[in-house]
Image (cartoon, helix red, strand yellow):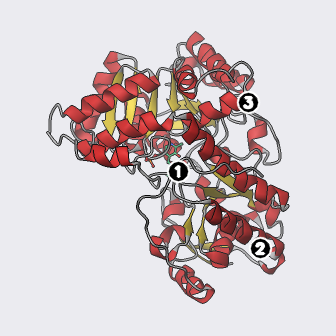
Amino acid sequence: PAYPPEPWRVKMVEPLRVTTRAEREELLREAGWNPCLLRSEDVYVDLFTDSGTNAMSDRQWSALMRGDEAYAGARSFYVFEEAVRTFYGYEHVIPVHQGRGGENILSRCLIRPGTHVPGNMYFPSTRAHQELNGAAFHDVIVDAAHDPASEHPFKGDVDLGKLRAVIAGCGADAIPYVSLAATVNMAGGQPISVANLTETCALAHAHGIPVFLDTARAVENAWLVKQREPGWAGRTVAEILLALCAPTDGAVMSAKKDSLANIGGWLALRDPALAEQARGLVLLYEGLHTYGGMAGRDMEAIAAGIAESVAEDHIRARVAQVEYLGARLGDAGVPIVRPAGGHCVCIDAAAGLPHVPRTEFPGQTLACAVYLEAGVRGVERGAVSAGRDPATGENRWPALELLRLAIPRRVYTRAHIDLVADSVIAVHRTRERITRGLTFAYEPPHLRFFQARFKPA
Ligand SMILES: CC1=C(O)/C(=C\N=C(/Cc2ccccc2)C(=O)O)C(COP(=O)(O)O)=CN1
């Protein structure tokens, strides 16, 4: 498979330490068979997340020196606000410390107990805040998104029939908003098409229901639209990004992904009254409405990162690196979610470890096996991440039981990606040695995959 040369050169390095398998076995036992609890110094290639782990450029690093740390009206806020307005097209820009800060505020503004929020598949923190405020989440994504082997080019699309059924069943008045993501992380970083997003907004708006977009990886979504959606090949990624945002009523952004920052985020709105309400909550939960829990220097880094994120050489190489890993694994017969996502390759652990029952968490089990092999850390995206239904307390059993390998932007080279591929393939070829899975030794109440501890089943 093709691997375009990286459109950057290294100026600073962080030395990596290689561990032995014996060390990794001890470290994993101490971490309760949860790679989330390992120290980063004990991880060789860290594919736990693309969130906050991306390399900043010399432009971003130098922008830090221009950070205005004034408490009120910092110059850096207006630089940040202008960048969001220019590239995402929303008028009211409200800073938050990171994505879930925006999720908390948007949910508190719009959700009341007993309401219903439809969306294109769930995301753990997004759904947690919707449920904490009393809403029931309804998945209205196309069926193909739940089928790892389907080659559907836009698995992030909404099934309009499903959305109509939720509106008819719940009543428009009980739906505070439709929650869309571009791309859909839990489906494997799968994009939504401009056409479907636009149709979804038209349907929601016909019922007086606003639509809010999670734009964490909307630039990757724009690149995949340029590659796959008829009529968009001649448009720039920047133009497609604006076209994705245009039909929506606002967005929640974790700037730790596309925008190449290590921390930060924003909530962007079109409605001035809702914006003022949200600013009021920023004072309670984030800081002042001109810094939102970020230092001025963070806002400078984000503004510079947004401009860099839409550069076509950058986004082409970024997605090509992910697709290279997907091609290497797919060619070797490793069952992966197809097509490869914008930020990650997901291994279908249920297909890879059919002899490990779902109740013993194949995704978590595979995450441990891959770490033991060569010190590569991924993250489980299956039943552990799905958590329990707040109404019944029962485990939710999502169709997708995955191990996600999320690639940080501008960090790893081809040699690292090949090491990841080789070690995952090695685990796959000796998978019958994995004879049993895991069960909880400690299960936390929220977002349990972060802090849970397991023991061999
Ligand atoms: C689509 C999307 C995200 O992927 C996202 C964070 N992703 C993360 C980090 C994470 C956070 C919570 C649960 C699991 C993993 C990722 O590893 O993939 C957030 C929260 O943003 P935040 O971390 O800045 O609070 C909002 N939307």
* Mark 3 within 8 Å of ligand 1, using the beta carbon: no
Camera sees residue 60 = yes
Q: Quadrant of residue 34?
A: bottom right
**Which residue bears the numbered disc 3?**
228
| Residue type indicated by callout 1 | Arg
The answer to which of marks 3 and 1 sits earlier in the sequence is 3
Residue at (55% x, 31% y) in the render? 179
In the image, what residue occupies the spot 26% across and 28% down? 78
Residue at x-position 45% and y-position 41%: 259
Q: Residue at x 74, y 50 (%)?
A: 2
Q: Is residue 308 above or below residue 29?
A: above
Instruction: Find the distance from the CA under tag 3 to the CA under tag 1.
Output: 22 Å
Tell me: 263 left or right of 310.
left
Task: Say if 70 sits above or below 436 in the image.
Answer: above
Dividing the picture into quadrants, the one containing residue 314 is: top right
Q: Nearer the viewer, residue 104 or 168?
A: 104
Residue designated by label 1? 409
- Mark 1 vs mark 2: in front: 1
| N-term-proximal mark, 3 vs 2 | 3
Rounded to the nearest whole Å, what is the CA distance between mark 1 and mark 2?
A: 25 Å
Q: Is residue 344 left or right of residue 1?
A: left
Instruction: Point out residue 420 in the picture as x, y percentages from the top left corner.
Output: 67, 66
* Circle 2 Cα neighbour tier, 10 Å, few/some/many (<14 / 14–19 / ≥20): some
Q: Are marks 3 and 1 in contact (CB under 8 Å)?
A: no
